[in-house]
Image (cartoon, rainbow, N blue to C red):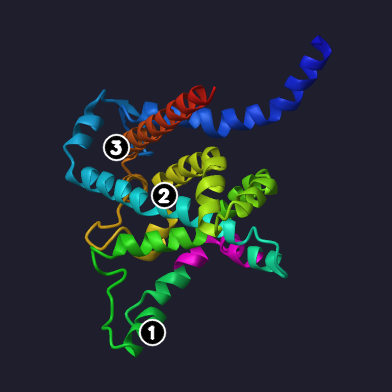
Amino acid sequence: MIYRAWHAWLFLLPALLLLLVFSIIPIFWVIYLGFTDYNVFSPPQWVGIENFQALFGDSKFWTALKNTFLYWILVTPAITIFSLFLAVLVNQKLVGIKLYRLSFYFPVLVSVVITALLWKWMFATDGIFNFLFSLIGVGPVSWLTSSSMAMISVAIVTVWQGLGYYMLIYLAGLQSVSNELYEAAEMDGAGFGRKQWSITIPAMKPIIFFVSVISTMGAFKEFTLMLVMTGGGPVNATTTLVYLVFQEAFEQINFGYASAIATVLFVIILLITLVNMKIQDKKGEGRV
């Protein structure tokens, strides 16, 4: 047993070292920098909680926090629901269904930057969407230049690109649902919708929960789409916490203040994850 245990640790060692170097140490380093005045050109100077005091009195921080939660509300429910609906549709035994699965997954393979540039062109005042709207007499929509539409537009792109990825996760779960359940439901006269509501959704609850957690973490960390499509605008309408970290760190060269923002974001994501895990554990205990 000792021999096998040592071999197991040796196999785990490379992954543990990578986790330590690229995740654990940077996390603690950022938390430390959050309590310092650091601009790269001089050693960090300990300032205690000054950065956090300034942070909670900064209106730009609260705007970014509000935008982050708005983006999460727009993205996570849509991805969780639509990707499940899509997985159910492409789980049918039809000719050429694998081609449909590949076509829905294809956006996941495209670079986020390329995706952002393509959708930025389509959302332009003279882009394809406004052209199509003009054909039915609808005036141009300010997709990316209106403070009320910019975040919605970015959320649309996020959902479009993420559907295929989460669809695959749901598809893997659907393979474990017995066809006998659906056959029995059909014999009782259940239609397509009734079968999904009574069989698919209850069976997929753990995976629905998993997708909601993963998409939540992704929503709180999204940065590239805001950078390429809107630059955080208009009037900070798409400035999220991650984008604010970028601005403070690499535009203002204020790494101490940026690290304080990153620390708050880390705590928010950690709390959401712990709450979700607690809810899942309680559900598991209830089933037992």
Taking the spot 35% from the left edge, 39% from the top edge, the residue there is 255
Crowd tier of the residue under label 1, counting other residues whose Cα lies within 10 Å: few below 14, some 14–19, many 20 or above: few
> Is any part of residue 36 visible from this angle?
yes
Main secondary structure found in the magenta portion: helix
- Which label sits in the foreground, 2 or 3? 2
Residue type, numbered disc 1: Leu
How much space separates mark 2 and mark 3, taking CA atoms? Answer: 29 Å
In x, y percent, where is residue 261?
A: 31, 38
Instruction: Give the side of residue 114 with respect to residue 48, left or right.
Output: right
Work out whether 288 lies above or below 229. above
In the image, which is nearer the foreground, mark 1 or mark 3?
1
Q: Position of residue 81 (x, y in %)?
A: 46, 53
Identify the image quadrant of the C terminus. Answer: top right
Residue 108 in the image, given as x and y percentages of width and height: 57, 59
Q: Is residue 108 magenta?
A: yes
- Residue placed most toward the observer, 258 or 263: 263
Question: Relative to 6, is 210 on the left or the right?
Answer: left
Give the residue at mark 2. 76
> Vertical placement of 16 versus 2: above or below?
below
Cα separation between marks 1 and 3: 45 Å
Label 2 sits on what residue type? Thr
Does residue 252 show up? no
Element type at marker 2?
Answer: helix
275 up-or-down from 103: above or below: above
Front position in the image: 55 or 79: 79
Q: Earlier in the sequence, mark 1 or mark 3?
A: 1
Q: Which residues are magenta?
A: 102-116
Of mark 1 and mark 2, the one earlier in the sequence is 2
Identify the residue at image location x=57%, y=41%: 203
Q: Residues within 10 Å of mark 2 (few under 14, many from 20)?
A: many
Q: Residue at x 45, y 24 (%)?
A: 282
Provide the residue designation for mark 1.
132
